Image (cartoon, rainbow, N blue to C red):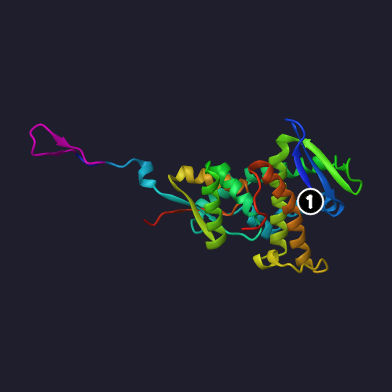
Amino acid sequence: MALPNETEQPGVIQIDETKTKEELDLPWNVIVHNDPINLMSYVTMVFMRVFGYPRTKAEKHMLEVHNKGRSLVWSGGREQAEHYVHQLHTYQLLATMEKSKE
Amino acid sequence: MTNLRVQSIDDKHIRISGIASVLAVMLREMPEILEMRDAPDARERLFPKPTRANDKINKEWQQMIGPELRHLFVSAGETLTRDLTALTADQEDAEAYQVEFPIEHVRAWMSALNQARLILGEIHQIEETDMNRADLNPQDPRHLAALRIHLLGYVLQSFVELEIGDEPKDSI
C-alpha cells in the first residue's frame, strides 16, 4: 500500500487512491456464442430471466448472437461473471467469460 | 401439429394437448435420447468450458460446476419421463394425445426438450444449413435428426410463448 504524501497545504496529507480487489478484477466480459440449435425465442427468454433484461434489450443481444456469432451480454466483476455463465449453462447456452482487454 | 396447445388448466397444472401421434412418438423417445448426454460431443456441448483459454478456471469449473449441472439435467429428464407416463388420448381429438403435469415441472420440461435437441444436434453434427433446409428427407439420418430437432423445438416454442408471449420460431 502507498504511504501518505505530504501536500503544500500545512497539516494536510494526500492519500493515494487505492483500488479494491474487485476493481482490480474489473471487467470480465460474459459472451454468448451462436449455435445452430437453440431457438431465438428461447435465447431471448433466457436473457430476460438471467439478466432481468427487458424484452427489447434481450432481443437485441439475441440478434447480435444470431447475426455476428457472439454477443457481449454483461461486463463486471469476476464473481458475478461466473454466476452468470453458470446460469447460462444451466439453460444450455454456449457462454464463456473473458477478461476485458481494455 | 398445428393443434398443439400448451396451456395452464388451473394455477397448479399445465396441459399439452393436440399432440400429433408422430410427436407423441418423439416425446416417448426422449428418455433414450437423453441417455446419450455422455456421448463425447454431447457432453462437450452440455457441459461447456467457461473460458476459451484459461485451463485453470476450466478445470476448476468442471470439478465444481460439472456435477451440479449433471444433476440438474438428469433430474429434468427424470421429471419429463415420469410426466410422460400420463400421456393419453386427447379428449377433443381422437387422433392426438395430451398430457397434464404440475406447473412447477415446466422448467424441467424446457430443459429436457432443449437437452434432447442439443444432443441430437451434436451426435448428428447438425449445422445451420441443415436446420434451414426445406427439403428434409426422413430417410437420411441427418435430415431425420434435424426434423426431430424441429419437432421438439415446436413443443419448446410453445412453452416459451407461455412464458414470454409469441415469438417467431427459428434457431439462432
Q: Is residue B126 visible?
A: no
Q: Is residue B80 left or right of residue B90?
A: left
Helix, strand or loop: magenta stretch:
loop
Quarter placement of the C terminus of chain B: bottom right
Describe the element under mark 1 as helix, strand or loop: helix
The residue under the point 72% across, 64% down is B124
Q: Nearer the viewer, residue B170 or A81?
A: B170
Kindly identify the amino acid type of the residue bearing the numbered disc 1: Met
Q: Is residue A61 above or below residue B103?
A: below
Q: Is residue B159 visible?
A: yes
- The magenta stretch spans residue A14: yes
Tag 1: Cα neighbours inside 10 Å, few (<14), some, or many (≥20)? many
The residue under the point 48% across, 46% down is A81
- The magenta stretch spans residue B146: no
Q: Is residue B133 above or below residue A71?
A: below
Q: Is residue A61 left or right of residue A40?
A: left
Q: Is residue A67 left or right of residue B69?
A: left
Q: Which residue is mark 1?
A: B30
Magenta stretch bounds: A4-17
Please state the horizontal and vertical placement of residue B67, each as a whole percent of the image. 64, 45
The residue under the point 74% across, 62% down is B146
The part of the image, by quadrant, that contains residue A10 is top left
The part of the image, by quadrant, that contains residue B22 is bottom right
The residue under the point 77% across, 34% down is B9
Please state the horizontal and vertical placement of residue B161, each as a whole percent of the image. 68, 45
Q: Please state the chain letter of the residue tagged with numbered disc 1 in the rendered image.
A: B
Q: Is residue B87 above or below residue B147?
A: above
Please state the horizontal and vertical placement of residue A44, each as a whole percent of the image. 59, 49
Q: How many marks?
A: 1
